[in-house]
Amino acid sequence: MNSENFYSQLPLLDNFRDITEPENFVDVPDDWYILVTDIRGSTKAIEAGRYKEVNLLGACSIVAVLNVAGKTEIPFVFGGDGASLLIGRSLLPAAKIALLAAQQMAKTEFDLDLRVGAVPVKVVVAANYPVKIAKFKVSENYSQAVFIGGGLTRAAELIKDPVPGNIYTFKNNNNGVSPTADFSGLECRWQDIPSKYGEIVTLLVMVREDFGRESHLIYRKVIQKIEYIYGKEDCLNPIVTENLKLTLNSINLVKETLVRASNANWLERQMYLSKIQLETALGSLLMNLKVKTEELDWGVYKDIAIAATDYRKFDDMLRMVISGNAWQRSQLTEYLEQNYREGKLVYGLHVADRALMTCLVFERNGQQVHFVDGADGGYALAAKDMKQRMIKQLTVDS
């Protein structure tokens, strides 16, 4: 198997529960690299009401690398305040430039510090943190990478290590020349999406490493319990057609403008903002009138978008954004808390009344993915909640 095309040749899983079967995973080639990005101080930024900007920059780092990769399919995971991506060795130099450009844009346009770096797969594997991957078919337009083994988590720890001269973080050594990136495909044009049942729960679940192979069975039971409480796919997905509405508010659209026209002058930025306002108004009209063109049936575009959402995923832990009610959440919390007290897992949870969606759209009727997070800081605040439980559990263990 060609290492550079390794990911594109993986078989597709068509049932989310199949991610709990270890035999469905294969080792990532040891000459690949794990790219990690995250916002330093994301929790404080979110608490200051900047959760949309944090999400946007997490998505920026993905689209910048995808545009470098071109037609080469690469795996990635959106984490709310950052992302993880895996690339072959030949893509590393260009990916580094793109991520440094994203870092510079984050600082210049949003005054946020985007940390970027890379760790060789062989480094974490040698430290006994495997990087195993599978591929889950979410829709006709989006297949999702799934990771087990702990390698991604270890890579993130290495890149976030505050040690002076960290060898894994990228630094701009271009002698004053500003790096550039292509953010084409990034869109931020939907209003916040209200929960169809009252609540949006952002959930993280991590089974303890010392359970070994039994950990996969625990994850399977957790997924089954979530489906039992909340229902199957149509019920779990927090994005529904009737609540999905485009925004015409320039305050919301200007965030996309700051990214897509980051190197432009004032007039060019105004022209870009006017362009996407017109596109959004036209798109809303076409969807409402259910217009069919040669390229797209606009009456079903919302369904196409919803089908390509990443509301559930797995990268060394289970991540989900679920729509439900308070009673369902209490049932879920009771189940997770029991397993937490028994020392099987740790979890983090955040509750909001709406979700938000940041989109990568390369073709209206083709390749696209829509990143879903709970509003007001979903994944980042769920991670903070989980860290507190980890600390408490370590105290009990010691």
Image: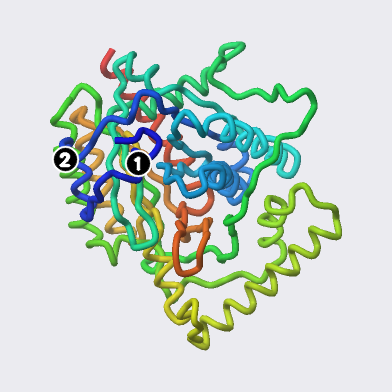
Asked which secondary structure carries label 1, the reply is helix
Give 284 or 95, whichever is nearer the viewer.
95
Which residue is found at the position 21% from the left and 27% from the top? 343
Q: Pointer 2: residues within 10 angstroms few (<14), some, or many (20+)? A: few
Three-letter amino acid code at disc 2?
A: Glu
Which residue is found at the position 20% from the left and 36% from the top? 339
Give 22 or 206, whichever is nearer the viewer.
22
Q: Is residue 27 above or below residue 331?
A: above
Q: Position of residue 264 (x, y in %)?
A: 80, 51
Tell me which label, 2 or 1, sits earlier in the chain. Answer: 1
Q: Report the mark closest to the observer, 2 or 1.
A: 1
Give 249 or 383, whichever is nearer the viewer.
249
Asked which secondary structure carries label 2, the reply is loop
Residue topped by disc 1: 7
Position of 389 with respect to 118 (left or right) is: left
Q: Position of residue 312 (x, y in %)?
A: 34, 51
Which residue is found at the position 51% from the left and 81% from the top? 287
Q: Is residue 25 above or below residue 50?
A: above
The label on residue 21 is 2
Three-letter amino acid code at disc 1?
A: Tyr
Quadrant for the N terminus, please: top left
Name the image colouring: rainbow
Position of 376 with respect to 232 (left or right) is: right
Q: Position of residue 268 (x, y in %)?
A: 82, 59
Q: Is residue 271 visible?
A: yes
> Within the image, what quadrant is residue 299 found in?
bottom left
Q: Is residue 20 above or below residue 148?
A: below
Q: Position of residue 154 (x, y in %)?
A: 39, 23
